[in-house]
Image: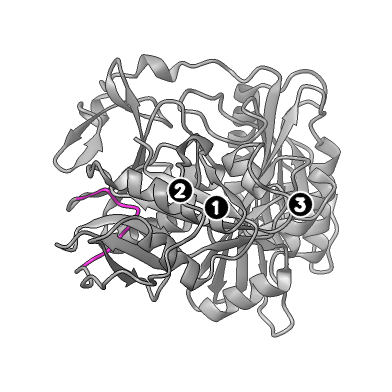
């Protein structure tokens, strides 16, 4: 059952058009507004939700609709993305969603995703404006289909499941109430990297429906059962006796891979500071271009702007901020950026993934150049560069993928000073020096530059290096 439908339109869905498209779904329905107007909800006469509609998103980042909805999605020029979610378990709700997005697409020169859910509707919207009001619910999470004391379960069934604002709100609600966010999908769905990050590690889970075993964890392969109000492995986690789903041993992505970069920077806070500079430099060195867009969820609708990102993060302090940052349509690249205020200043933690094919060389020289740039100008604390065989489009399938191979590791001046410069230089791997005004940083190559890198060699080398460095001290 398709519960999430999207209208992509070239013209903005203004409040009157939205209300008219909702009114066109049929009589005897009631309307209420949630989240300061960010969500409109159609209900039956008893107040039971049937259809939730998110405020339209103005997507101005090239390639972003194609990344999430397919190469044939409307993408040339600014596009308005209006998402409608039908209530699960209500037979008529999906038809309401299809009617609503079809009316909206017809009125505003657009299309429906998925395309086969567009239904014939009259060309003219009704003049009657707004359905009668429904009472406010006690609690509202439109993305959540099942809510228990232990978990919030969201059922998703599109080919690529992204960290939409609905799911981001559900995740925040789960964190505040100590619940797990568990997303249930069919076996053909894939996750974006930001959503994978949210679901990595229990109690949050990606729950994949499977004909053979019922359900399994799409990131670990563990067979799952619905027990005590949440999905969990049926066995004792400490005994190691949990069965694995046969479907998890899927095909490898031959000839495709990903470059993964994780780094942290720290700088003193001042009024002139602009965030995102280190991540922008990483995009330039690894993709040849700066980021194309950013946002607090997906789609990343805003054109890249360090100034606007900084203003939003500053408005939220002392609380932290989390962002999604994407590259342009010519090269798959996506990152998450976490910003936090600390006693020493402002920390930025970034994870960047870049897709590559068999014809692309792993940019070893680029890792060193980036580490040198971040050390000299952006307050590098640490950096790890890795690669792995995986989908070049950076989406995550519900089957096993090889673990990343650590390729390089770097420490910034503050970390070198904490370890002790002489001790750090005496590491079993001879480091290269990274120059900076406040002291040297160090760069370590973890695997040979020739041949196929081995995960076992990379991890053994990295673990040995970390044990050595942790045995030091500035004294």
Secondary structure, magenta segment, majority class: loop
Specify start and end residues of the magenta stretch as a single range: 139-147
Q: Which residue corresponds to mark 2?
A: 121
Q: Position of residue 154 (x, y in %)?
A: 32, 46
Pick the residue in front: 283 or 350: 283
Residue at 79% x, 31% y is: 362
Mark 1 or mark 3, which has the lower sequence index?
A: 1
Q: Secondary structure at mark 2?
A: loop
Residue at 75% x, 26% y is: 357
Q: Secondary structure at mark 1?
A: helix
Q: Quadrant of the C terminus?
A: bottom right
Q: How packed is label 1: few (under 14 Cα within 10 Å), some, or many (20 or more)?
A: many
Q: Which residue corresponds to mark 1?
A: 106
249 in relation to 278, above or below: above
Q: Secondary structure at mark 3?
A: helix
Instruction: Inspect this view and state whether residue 105 appears.
Output: yes
Residue at 63% x, 42% y is: 73
Q: Which residue corresponds to mark 3?
A: 282
| Left-right relation of 9 to 283 | left
Quadrant of res 444: top right
């Amino acid at each position: 059952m398709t519960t999430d439908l999207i209208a992509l339109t070239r013209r903005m869905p203004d409040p009157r058009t939205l209300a008219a498209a909702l009114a066109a779904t049929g009589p005897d329905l009631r309307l209420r507004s949630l989240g300061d107007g960010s969500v409109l909800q159609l209900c039956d006469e008893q107040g039971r939700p049937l259809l939730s509609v998110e405020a339209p998103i103005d997507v101005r980042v090239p390639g972003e609709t194609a990344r999430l909805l397919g190469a044939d999605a409307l993408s040339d020029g600014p596009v308005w993305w209006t998402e409608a979610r039908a209530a699960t378990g209500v037979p008529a709700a999906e038809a309401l969603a299809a009617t609503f997005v079809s009316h909206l697409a017809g009125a505003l020169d657009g299309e429906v995703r998925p395309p086969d859910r567009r239904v014939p509707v009259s060309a003219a919207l009704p003049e009657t404006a707004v359905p009668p009001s429904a009472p406010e619910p006690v609690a509202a999470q439109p993305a959540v289909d099942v809510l228990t004391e232990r978990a919030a379960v969201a059922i998703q069934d599109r080919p690529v499941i992204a960290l939409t604002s609905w799911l981001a709100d559900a995740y925040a609600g789960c964190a505040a109430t100590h619940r797990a966010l568990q997303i249930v999908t069919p076996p053909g769905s894939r996750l974006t990297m930001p959503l994978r990050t949210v679901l990595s590690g229990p109690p949050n889970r990606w729950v994949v429906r499977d004909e053979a075993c019922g359900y399994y964890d799409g990131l670990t392969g563990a067979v799952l059962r619905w027990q005590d109000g949440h999905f969990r492995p049926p066995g004792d986690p400490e005994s190691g006796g949990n069965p694995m789903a046969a479907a998890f041993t899927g095909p490898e992505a031959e000839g495709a891979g990903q470059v993964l970069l994780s780094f942290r920077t720290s700088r003193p806070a001042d009024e002139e500071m602009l965030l995102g500079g280190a991540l922008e430099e990483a995009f330039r060195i690894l993709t040849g271009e700066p980021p194309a867009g950013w946002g607090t969820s997906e789609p990343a609708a805003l054109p890249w702007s360090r100034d606007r990102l900084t203003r939003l993060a500053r408005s939220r302090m002392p609380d932290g901020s989390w962002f999604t940052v994407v590259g342009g349509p010519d090269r798959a690249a996506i990152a998450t950026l976490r910003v936090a205020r600390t006693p020493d200043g402002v920390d930025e933690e970034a994870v960047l993934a870049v897709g590559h094919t068999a014809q692309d060389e792993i940019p070893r020289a680029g890792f060193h150049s980036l580490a040198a740039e971040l050390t000299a100008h952006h307050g590098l604390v640490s950096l790890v560069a890795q690669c792995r065989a995986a989908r070049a489009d950076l989406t995550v399938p519900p089957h096993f993928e090889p673990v990343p191979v650590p390729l390089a590791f770097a420490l910034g001046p503050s970390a070198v000073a904490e370890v002790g410069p002489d001790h750090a230089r005496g590491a079993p791997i001879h480091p290269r020096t990274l120059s900076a005004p406040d002291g040297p940083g160090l760069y370590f190559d973890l695997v040979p530059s020739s041949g196929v890198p081995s995960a076992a060699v990379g991890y053994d080398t990295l673990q040995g290096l970390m044990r050595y460095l942790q045995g030091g001290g500035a004294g």
